[in-house]
Amino acid sequence: MSNDSLFVKARTLDTKQFISFVIDNHYKIYSLSFDSAIAMTAEAKQLALTNGWTSQAAYASLYHGVATYLRGDYKQALPSYLYALHVFDSLENHRGIARTCNEMAVFYHKQKQLDDAYNALDKAETAAKLAHDEEALGTTYSHHMSFLVRREKHKEAYPYMMKVFEIRKRTQDSVGLGYIYLDIANYKLINDQLDESLELVNKSTEIRKRIGDNQGVAVNTVIKGEFYFQTGNFKKAIPFFEKAIALATPIGYTDLIRFGYDMLQQSYVKLGDYKNAYENLQKNQIFNDSIYNVEKSKALLSLQTQYETEKKEKEIELLSIENQLKVIEVKNADNRFYASLGGATILLLIGVLAFNRYKQKQQILLTEEKAINQRLGFKSLIEGEEKERKRIAQELHDGLGQLLSTARLNVSAMEDRVEQIVTKQWENSIKLIDEAVTEVRHISHNMMPNALISIGFEAAVREQAHIINDAGQVKIHTQLPEQKIDLPESEAIALYRVIQEVLNNAIKYAKAKNIWLTITNDRDLKVVIKDDGIGFDTSMIASSTGIGWRNIQSRIEILNGELQIHSEIGKGAEVNLKIAI
């Protein structure tokens, strides 16, 4: 069905039929045109709200979010998902919850909010099973598999792959089969079975052509190019990237167009054709800027934290109101006490004793409430600081890093035209740019290690130890558990900062030659950091004017953990951390 005929058919329907048509055919609509899908889902949602059809409004909002996400407008996608989820939760619509959480998991994973992504998948799986919705359950397993593959955990991903394949065959889901064939193709490619892999991609493409999935055909085309690229056949990859861009342009698939130009640029660099590489890099930057400009990045990061921040502010406000009520209660007790002065002496004495006891109790409660307020405030401050570190690190990497890479490509492109007289200056320019790129990466890593966000806590710890060992001043011996340490992102960052601070203290002040870092993950998570340095008097920690130990203790309090420090002059130091998980 063409875009025009689809609109013609839609306009022949009455309001209720139009809304149902858009919801039932959302995939077909955005396969033809993302702009059409965005307009029609927005109209369907508004009409459903006007008529009080809450469930239909939620489904229209969900598919509006899908269309805006695929169009590259991430700022509009999340509010659409959140509205749909809120409505489905209130209606206890498990089918709607499962489908919305599946889409939100992809969104969060794209933003590298891994904890949120996996939480969404868990909620989707539970809801899909309650709704007996095999199609949504297959999608959940598919996302689990995809996330594992991106972390190169292919053996763990394979069982999910087979579950999805069986579900798609059993439900005769053409769209789902088109996707799962691609996933199995990728698995075959990883195991060096290129011919089998390409055959599966072709099967997926045949299905997508048969159902008129223009978007899917464009995706499959760029995937074939990627397969040839990964096997080193760059010349054969280039026509597929060019064809994918041509297919994606009429339907407005901005993200795929950007990716296609990026892969063309990389292919030409591999072939040593810097002229074509530079031209495609410029085209990539045009689309990259349209999706990932700084203002959108800031808005996107703040949008996700807005709901959490409002919740924390309300909790703190509630605690403040409770404190004020307790103060008023104490004052009222004062008034009642003074009113009783006209009573007998014995009653006065009893009243004084009772009042003092009551006042002390209220004072203790007030102190406890203030302590809770302080902890909440400090926790919010720490979380805000980490989010700002993450934002700045991302901007350094995506902004300044991209500019430096472009500058280097520009300079490299002039290599053949450099005269002998300026060869030294040209070489110095290349060297300075490379040093600047390295320094940006170093600063970005210190602010927010990529490993901590992308592949987990253990990888970030190993990377930190590797960086210190490379410096050559001290040797770090690490012993980490075999099983994955599964911590929420905020807790993983807090614990990583504690370990980082302790290691920095040992390097700067202990004059140690060796540091032993041991992490065990049994019923509790335990971290032991020992060094063979000069040691110190632990009684001096309490009177220390530095913020290092205070930051460590504050973060451990946020984690509800325990901190023990053992050291003697001349006998090194040992720091023990224990956190309940």
Image (tube, rainbow, N blue to C red):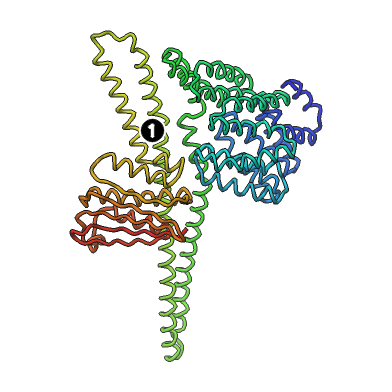
Residue beneath disc 1? 396
Q: Residue at x 49, y 41 (%)?
A: 302
Quadrant of the image containing the N terminus: top right
Q: Is residue 63 visible?
A: yes
The percent coordinates of residue 425 (x first, y second) are: 25, 16
The percent coordinates of residue 14 (x first, y second) are: 81, 32
Q: Residue at x 34, y 28 (%)?
A: 437
Q: Is residue 64 above or below residue 515?
A: above
Q: Is residue 104 above or below residue 581?
A: above
* Tag 1: amino acid: Leu
Residue toward you, 529 or 488: 529
Residue toward you, 118 or 144: 144
Q: How many marks?
A: 1
Give the side of residue 352 with respect to residue 199, left or right: left
Q: Is residue 215 visible?
A: no
Structural crowding at the residue carrying mark 1, measured as other residues with C-alpha within 10 Å and reported as few (<14), some (14–19) or many (≥20): some
Residue toward you, 408 or 566: 566
Residue toward you, 57 or 109: 109
Q: Residue at x 35, y 61 (%)?
A: 563
Give the side of residue 468 with respect to residue 232, left or right: left
Q: Quadrant of residue 540?
A: bottom left
The percent coordinates of residue 573 (x first, y second) are: 25, 58
The percent coordinates of residue 16 (x first, y second) are: 79, 36
Q: Secondary structure at mark 1?
A: helix
Q: Is residue 231 above or below residue 575?
A: above
